[in-house]
Image: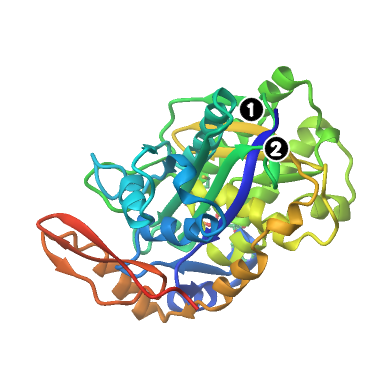
Amino acid sequence: MKIGIDLLHFATADYYLGLDTFATEKHLDVDKFYIGIGQEKMSISPPDEDVVTLAAKAAAPILDQIDANEISAILFATETGVDQSKSAGVFLHGLLNLSKHCRVIEFKHACYAGAAALQMATTMVRANPKEKVLVIAADIAKYDIDSSGEATQGCGAVAMLVTASPRIIMIEPGSGYFTDDVMDFWRPNQRTTALVDGKYSTKVYLSSLKQTWDHFTEQTGRTFEDIDYFCYHIPFTKMAEKAHQTLVRKVGATLTPAEFEAQTVPSQFYNRIVGNSYSASLFMSFISLLDHIESNIENKRISFFSYGSGCVAEFFTGIMQPGYQSVLMTAEHKQKIAQRTALTYAQYLEFYYQAEQLEENIVYEPKNRGAYRLAGIENYKRYYQKNKPES
Ligand code: COA
């Protein structure tokens, strides 16, 4: 039985900060970002945007195409949770008015949780092929002002409908995985921003890739040559480039520069202009590949490397399904990215600090132009609003 992703859509914020603006503000050479880390823009969420509204914007176009009452579970992966007890997915469930006969749970392990939720969803569908599971990976990457991580912020949500007989990609059974208790990135409960040992995190990312690759080959018998395109977790696109170089070296493959680029570059376009979206970034990379590759990739094998600091990593693969092009939402994705508004550094700071004000009662000024927004907090309860449909 084939199980995998049937429909796939992403959302990001309506605003961005250009790294050219950022470089000018910090008196740095912009090539440190354009070339050094391979990033151009960071999507910036206004105070009335959170992972619930991002997730709703990502999921709504999928639900419009199916009988939404058939969703049997929401697996919501995030490390930007909005409550320590109630899962973000239940807010989403209410906002999207889904069937009461649906289970909802939040998954967390840094940027890895999206892959964990996807694997769990395939297991649920394998156990009962009637299930239709909505997997959400949504995050807002936020670091301290003037920290090394500040240039690698961003935000986004990816919604994936996981079913039997999927129209986009079948996720293949078998994967390689790896866990090690390390402190490369963490966010204690009292903080809204992550703490990171940046250079160390890039080292652990690459060593985890080597460990998961060995486990993947042992478990599945698949080789580097069996894979056509490679998607990586992308905190910044240079990281994916370094990851692929590491893998190519490890397996002793000889690739021309053109072959190397063909295997990786299409899967980086969106990430380069959206920034880090933590748990969503690997799947945004996959959507970037689908939306930018010019050739037909039916029956091609795609690999996914998920890395969550702390750390948990997994390497798995999928096979593109015949006719996948007919269900892609490429135009919507490109339009939403193109419609974002550029912020000045001062406007970015205003959003940044307003979002820190976690008061008992607050009413947010409408800034989020999407179909769903966080309207306010009353007696510590978040309340959301459905706006007119996005044009
Ligand atoms: N032109 C071209 N390249 C330049 C440059 C310029 N003017 N100035 C710097 N660079 C290069 C550096 O040589 C370096 O390349 P290298 O990594 O290949 O050596 C790169 O740009 C980054 O510069 P660096 O001085 O190392 O940046 P930094 O101290 O600001 O740290 C991170 C970069 C990624 C560690 C930092 O942004 C961070 O902590 N990010 C958050 C954590 C994260 O995303 N971790 C990833 C694993 S999950």
Looking at the rendered image, the disc whose residue lies closer to the viewer, 1 or 2, is: 2
**229 on left or right of 356:** right
Dividing the picture into quarters, in which one does residue 127 lie? top right
- What residue is rendered at 54% in x and 56% in y? 62
- Tell me if residue 286 comes above or below residue 15 in the rendering: above
Q: Which residue is mark 1?
A: 212
Label 1 sits on a secondary structure element that is helix
Q: Amino acid at mark 1?
A: Thr
Q: Position of residue 46 (x, y in %)?
A: 35, 70
Give 171 or 303, whichever is nearer the viewer. Answer: 171
Mark 1 C-beta to ligand 1 under 8 Å: no
- What residue is rendered at 30% in x and 68% in y? 48
* Upstream in sequence: badge 1 or badge 2: 2
Q: Position of residue 38 (x, y in %)?
A: 63, 61
Q: Residue furthest top?
A: 218
- Tell me if residue 92 comes above or below residue 308 in the rendering: below
Q: Position of residue 342 (x, y in %)?
A: 48, 80
Q: Residues within 10 Å of mark 1 (few under 14, many from 20)?
A: many
Mark 2 C-beta to ligand 1 under 8 Å: no
Give 207 or 380, whichever is nearer the viewer. Answer: 380
Q: Amino acid at mark 2?
A: Met
Q: CA distance from mark 1 to mark 2?
A: 20 Å
Question: Which quarter of the figure is the N terminus placed in?
Answer: top right
Q: Does residue 29 appear in the picture of this structure?
A: no
Q: Which residue is mark 2?
A: 170
- What residue is rendered at 66% in x and 30% in y? 210
Dividing the picture into quarters, in which one does residue 77 lie? top left
Q: How is the image coloured?
A: rainbow
